[in-house]
Amino acid sequence: MTDQAVSGALERAVREAVERRRDELVELTRELVRRQTTLGAEEPAQVLVDERLRAVGFAVERVQPDGDAARADPYAGYPYLSYEGRSCVAARLAGSGGGRSLHLSGHLDIVPVERPDLWRHEPWSAEVAEGRIWGRGAGDMKGGLAAYLIAASVVAEVCDDRRGDLVFSSVIEEECGGNGMWSVLRAGYGADAVLIGESTALRLGHAGTGVVWARLSAAGGAGHAMLAGGDGPFDRLCRAVAGLRRVEAEINEPVRDPVFAAVRERPYGMTIGKIGGGVWTASTPHELVANVRFGFGRDLEPAEVQARLWEVVREASPEVEIQFEAFRARAYCHPTSGPLFDSLSAAHQAIIGSEAETVAFTATTDARYVEGACLCYGPVAGNLHGTDEWVDVETLVQTATVVALTAAEWTA
Amino acid sequence: MTDQAVSGALERAVREAVERRRDELVELTRELVRRQTTLGAEEPAQVLVDERLRAVGFAVERVQPDGDAARADPYAGYPYLSYEGRSCVAARLAGSGGGRSLHLSGHLDIVPVERPDLWRHEPWSAEVAEGRIWGRGAGDMKGGLAAYLIAASVVAEVCDDRRGDLVFSSVIEEECGGNGMWSVLRAGYGADAVLIGESTALRLGHAGTGVVWARLSAAGGAGHAMLAGGDGPFDRLCRAVAGLRRVEAEINEPVRDPVFAAVRERPYGMTIGKIGGGVWTASTPHELVANVRFGFGRDLEPAEVQARLWEVVREASPEVEIQFEAFRARAYCHPTSGPLFDSLSAAHQAIIGSEAETVAFTATTDARYVEGACLCYGPVAGNLHGTDEWVDVETLVQTATVVALTAAEWTA
C-alpha cells in the first residue's frame, strides 16, 4: 500500500470510530457541564477525566501546582486559591518508541455565572437544543476537552502501532493565572507538539495577547455617611481607572504588535469585571475594590505592564492601592508553519474539506507556556463567559475527528 | 408643699429609681446589642421590648408599615424589604386624663458590620470596658432605646397620679427610609410632644438634613473580557457619580439653609456606601451597581433633589439607570423654644448641672415625621455605622434620668 492509501484507511477508521462515539461525546460534554467546575470545585469533573483516560490505557497521575515556584516564575500566575485538594490530570499513552509525541490539553475550570435567571437554557443542565449543547463551560472549554478525550480514545483504539507518546492533560486555573498547564509542563509532560481544545471555530489558534490582572482598592474609613462627602473611595477608584484607561489608549494607539494589530482596532482590552465593597448605603465603606483585566502585545513584558499600571495609579489616585493577581501572562505567537501546523491543516482539509484558517486571540490561553509547536483547535461556540453559553455539536464531532487524525498521523 | 418642693421630691425619686436600675440599663442595652437587629431580623429584640413594656403596665400593640401607603406618601420611605413578620412596638400607658401626652421613641434597627475582624470589641458580644458598652447598635441607638425603656418604667413606678398618656415606640427601618416611625404615627400614636433617644451627647437634637438614596446601575452585556475595552459599565458609573458630585457641590456652595450652614462647611454629604456587580475579573459584568446617599437642606424638597439627580445622570452618563430607594426624607428643623424644649432643658439643667446645648444633624432621624414638638436626646456615643461602635454608660444613665424627669413633669 502507498502512504496515501494508509492515510485513507486511517482516515476512514478514525471517522468511523469518532462517529460511533458521537452520542458519547455529547453525553460526556453534558456531564462535564453538569459538574460545575468553578474555582476550587474542579475535582468531581477531574475524577471523570481521570477514569476515562485510565479506561483507554493511559497512565494517569495528578499534578498539583507548586504555588511558591509559580510565584517565583515571572510568567506563571499568582496562585489564586490554595491548591489543597485541587490538581491537574496528566496522562500518557506510551508509544513503541522513536516517534513524535503529541500532547492534547484542555482546561476544566470555568468562570462563574453572574445571573443564572437570565439564561434561556439553565446554565448547569446542559440542554441540547438547536444543534448545540448549552451551559456554562460548554464552549470554554468542556466541549473541546470532551472532543479531545474522544480523540484520545479513538487513537488508543485505532492506532495499535503508534511509535510516539500521546500525552493528555486536563488542567485547572486556565481562567485565573494558568498555573495548571504551567505545572503540568514542568512535571515532564512536554511533547514534540501540543494541541489545546479551546473553541476556535475549527481555525488554528496560534496567538494570544498578554494579560495581567490587578486589584484596585480604596480605603474609606468606615463610619456614618453624615460625616462624609465631596470625595470618597469610589471617586478615588474612578480616578485610578481613568489613569489605567490612558495606558490602555497608549498601547492601542498605535498597536505595535502586528499580530494583534491585524485582529481588530484596539485589540488590547481593559475590563473592570468585578467590583465590591461596603454593606450599607449610608455607611462609609471600609474598602471598595475594583478588579481589572488588562491586555497587551508582545512588545511589552507583563512586568513592564505592571510597572506602568502601578505608576499611573500612583499618579492618578495615590490613595488607591494596586495589587497584581492571577495572570501575568506574556503575549505569544506560535508560527503558522511547520510540521504541527501542516499536519493539523492537512487533517482539517481531509475532514472538513476546506483550507484551515488561522486566528489570533485578544485573550490568553495555556498555549503561551509551550516553548515548541502549539496550536489551539476546537469547535464553534458562543457566549463564552456570558449568558447562554453554547457549543456546536457538529463541529465538536469534527474537532474530535480532525484531532484524532492529526494525533494518529503525528504519533504514527 | 410648693411646686418647687414637689419638683425636688420628684427629682429625687426619679434619680433614685433610675440609679436602682443602673445595672438593669446596662444589661438591657447589652441584650439588645446581642440580638442582631439588622434589616429583617428585628423581631427577636422587639419581643424583648414588647415584654418589658407590658411588664410595667403599657398597653402594647404591633404596627406593621403599609408599604403601598408609604409609597404613595412623598415623604415616607420606599419599602426596602417586605414587612411580613416585621413590625414596630407601639405602646401606651394611659394617664388619668386632662394632661399632656409624651411619646418616647427609638429605633431598634441597626446597620450591618462590614469587617467584624477589624473590631477590637467583637460587634455582637456587647463588651463593657472603659466605661462604655461596645457593639454594633450600642450607640445607634440601642443605648438610647434602653435608657428610654428604663425611663418609662421609672415614670410608671414613680408617677402614680399622671394625667397625660405616656406613649412608647420601638420602630424599624429608621436606617433605611423611616417607615417604622411613619407608620406608628399614622396608627394614632401622635402625642403633644415626642422625644427620640438618638445619641446626641446630652444635647437637644432639633434638626436634620434631608436624605435621598439612589441606586445607580450600569449594564455591561455579560461576555468575555477579550471582546471589551475602552469603556465599560464601571466608567459609566464613574461619569454618573461625577455628575452627582457636581450637584453636591452646587448645594454646598453656598449652603442656603442657615441651620445646616451653621453646622459645618459642606454639610450635605454624598456617599457611595456600597458597590457591587460582576463575578469574574475577565468577564464583562452584566450589571454594576453603586448605592448613593445624598443629603440636602430645607430649601429643597426630596422630589426636587431626585429630579435633579435623575437629570444630571441622564446628562453625564445616559446609559446609567438611576432608581430611588429607601429614603426620601425632607430636611427638618424643630424649634429651639417652647414647652418641650423648656421642659427638657430644665430637666437637663437639674440632673446634669449645665445648660443644655442644641445640635443639628447632617443626617436624618425619625423626628422629621413629627408635626408638633419633637427633640432628640440621648447619650454620648461613638463610631456610629463604623468599627468599634460604643455608647458611654454614664451618659446613658443620665439620659434615662433626664428623660424620666421630663416625662414625669410633662405628663403630671
Image: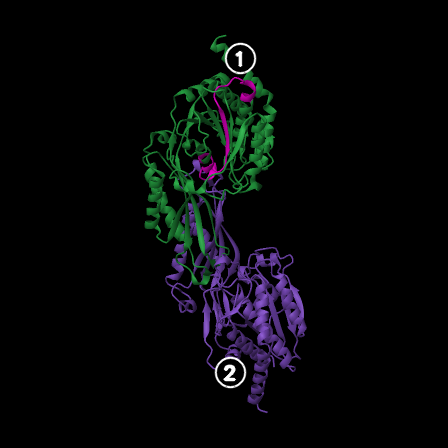
Chain colours: A green, B purple
Q: CA distance from mark 1 to mark 2?
A: 108 Å
Q: Is B194 rendered above or below residue B88?
A: below
Looking at the rendered structure, the kind of residue marked 2 is: Ala
Span of residues in magenta: A154-182
Would residue B162 appear left or right of A180 to someone viewing this image? Answer: right
Residue B63 figure quarter: bottom right
Percent x, y for residue B78?
56, 56
Q: Indicate the secondary structure of the residue bearing disc 1.
A: helix
Please report, as a chain letter, where disc 1 is located.
Answer: A
Asked whether residue A163 is drawn in magenta, I would say: yes
Please report, as a chain letter, where disc 2 is located.
Answer: B
Near mark 2 (Cα within 10 A), the count class, few <14, some 14-19 or many ≥20, is some
Q: Residue furthest bottom?
A: B1
Residue identified by numbered label 1: A9
Looking at the rendered structure, the kind of residue marked 1 is: Ala
Please state, as top left, top right, bottom left or bottom right, where the N terminus of chain B lies in the image.
bottom right
The residue under the point 53% across, 37% down is A387
Taking the image as drawn, is residue A73 in sight? yes
Percent x, y for residue B343?
53, 80
Residue identified by numbered label 2: B350
Q: Is A278 rendered above or below residue A369?
A: below
Identify which residue, B278 or A177, lies in the foreground. Answer: A177
Would residue B145 appear left or right of A236 to someone viewing this image? Answer: right
Identify which residue, A392 or B191, lies in the foreground. Answer: A392
Asked whether residue A325 is drawn in magenta, I would say: no
